[in-house]
Amino acid sequence: MTIHSLLVANRGEIARRIFRTCRELGVRTVAVYSDADADAAHTREADAAVRLPGDAPADTYLRPELLVKAALAADADAVHPGYGFLSENADFARRVLDAGLVWVGPTPSAMEAMAVKTRAKELMREAGVPLLEPLAPEKITAADLPLLVKAAAGGGGRGMRVVRELDSLQAELDAAAREASAAFGDGEVFVEPYVERGRHVEVQVLADHHGTVWTLGTRDCSVQRRHQKVIEEAPAPGLTGAQRKTLADAAERASRAVGYTGAGTVEFLLDGEGRPYFLEMNTRLQVEHPVTEAVYGVDLVALQLRVAEGERLPERPPEANGHAVEARLYAEDPAAGWRPQAGVVHRLALPELPDVRLDSAVTDGETVTAHYDPMLAKVIAWAPDRAAAVRKLAHCLDRAHVHGPVTNRELLVRTLRHPDFVAGRMDTGFYDRHLPELVGTRPAGRSLAALIAALADAAGRSRFGGFRNLRSAPQRKRYRLEPDGEELEVAYHLDRGGLHSEGHPSVRLLSHTPDRVVLEVDGVRRRFDVAGYGDRVHVDGPAGSWTLTALPRFPERAAEVEPGSLLAPMPGTVTRIADGLAVGDAVAAGQPLLWLEAMKMEHQVRAPAAGTLTSLDVRLGSQVEVGALLAVVGEPSTAL
């Protein structure tokens, strides 16, 4: 049959990406949206949109019956699940088919075969695919360490924990189960050996209903944080021809073993000797699929639709060409434990470069909430070879304008330029080894950035550009550098003789407007773009980007905060309170007291010091904003 109208049972970046292909093919699009997404880009861009009442995924995007009802109400004749949410849920696929709709994905039986990783491993063992054997928790000893606890359903790094001490195994099993249940509606977890410094390499597959199975090369996804991919590339660097063939053959055997159709990915872990072990098969489109598209010159979403319509694939896939690298831009602070961020994305813009692609979840002016994954966008660069692709992507991210919440943009740039990454020496422990050096160095030129912000502000307040005829007391401005909180003060004169700035004798002002300042710094002309949003100022220049908050000339006395107060580090939901915790209890330093869920990840709030719980200001299910008071731990003597 021919698909005329497609509902995408998803949101954000992947919904927008699927809609783009649909527009090119002439397929009508239908979006679904939660209340939090009422004004989101994917909602606005679809030809029709159906509301899913509520905000939380469990009330909206994880409700199969609501999604099928939405498709029928909007006269869609097919459903594409995207990735995440219900994309690997066989029950949802079956409901779609039972409603007389086309399911753009593998058969429910194939999804069921691969949905639970423990059962998938049994199938792969029978198909001759190499794998790591699961371990029974009750039989684990210290000799089995280190271990990896994994969610049996879902993916994306959620429900995963590395265990290095036997005493912490049960606690990590419980935490992984809670996180998996919240993300996928299934709390089953299992344990397997943890391979230190392994490489995460995967194979893209595409199969039709006529027995043709394509393997579209390899992707390396080893650079990860919290077991979630950050940078991916195709093809995986440094593999021999024999290794590539072994991986492709294993991926094809895995696909044929379950009668797979549509797009999917078979993931492997390569140990230090280059031996591959089957991890899982993702029965859906992957976040990192654009790098394969760039190298093979295909549109995987268009091919998914063709397969769903019953078309036959050509016998052989196209040949690979060049190299592609993708970076995921997250609203998070890597220097603060990858803490997710929320707020308005005022601007997200890339420099115009050939063969660079932006797949964005947001448009300018949208608000990032705590309800969903913090990924803002994916940036993909293609070039004839790896070195050129890596260099291009780093340059593109470095010169991008990213105005809004704190992001991992600077970390991405430094990662792409790190000697080990440039040389292709990556593994899943890359950030474990290198994160301190990658986030520890503050960008140079902080005081100069503050001066630029002040000059732009002066230009905006004076139609004469801020110049004065007579020398007077210097103008003074105070700023706070974000996100580290360093306070800066600049003092400067603007008169007919030009710019006179304390601390910057080699700087000459050439021109300035509210949105652009041109300086000569040590004899070199440099241009800086300036954008202000309330008291927040973003300065983008050739040597980096800075975010500053304008501070009052005479700071007000800070609000009193009771010693020992535990404040919410991010917006989120209180999903757990320590068993039996009550006011008056004695607590130990570092003891977990509360658990917050933000952007599908669980975060512990621990006691800052030993003492007595004197206040507990939240309850299970409480929604909190950044800085909200959660609890207070007082001195031990307060209990007397």
Image (cartoon, helix red, strand yellow):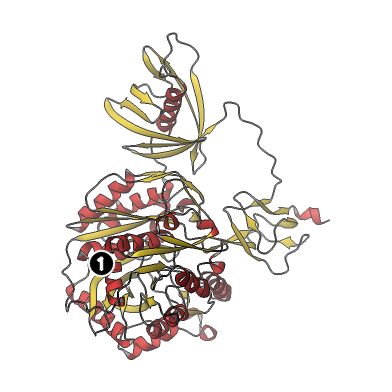
> Residue extending furthest top?
470
In terms of depth relative to the viewer, which is nearer, 188 or 131? 188
Q: Quadrant of residue 556?
A: top right
Rendered residue at 32%/63% (across/down): 22
Q: Position of residue 617 (x, y in %)?
A: 72, 55
Which amino acid lies under the numbered mark 1 shown in the image of this protein? Answer: Ala
Work out whether 363 lies above or below 444.
Answer: below
- 285 on left or right of 621: left
Work out whether 594 lies above or below 259.
Answer: above
Q: Quadrant of residue 540?
A: top left
What crowding class fits label 1: few (fewer than 14 Cα within 10 Å), some (14-19), or many (20 or more)? Answer: many
At mark 1, the secondary structure is loop
> Residue extending furthest right?
640
- 101 on left or right of 355: right
Quadrant of the drawing holding the C terminus: bottom right
Q: Is residue 373 visible?
A: yes
> Residue extending furthest bottom?
126
Q: Position of residue 123 (x, y in %)?
A: 37, 88
Quadrant of the drawing holding the N terminus: bottom left
Q: Is residue 234 visible?
A: no
Q: Position of residue 605 (x, y in %)?
A: 61, 59
Rendered residue at 36%/24% (across/down): 512
- Which residue is disc 1 drawn over? 236
- 545 on left or right of 621: left
- 153 on left or right of 212: right
Q: Position of residue 306 (x, y in %)?
A: 27, 73
Rendered residue at 50%/26% (across/down): 477
Rendered residue at 19%/72% (across/down): 240
The image shows a total of numbered marks equal to 1
In terms of depth relative to the viewer, which is nearer, 390 or 16? 16
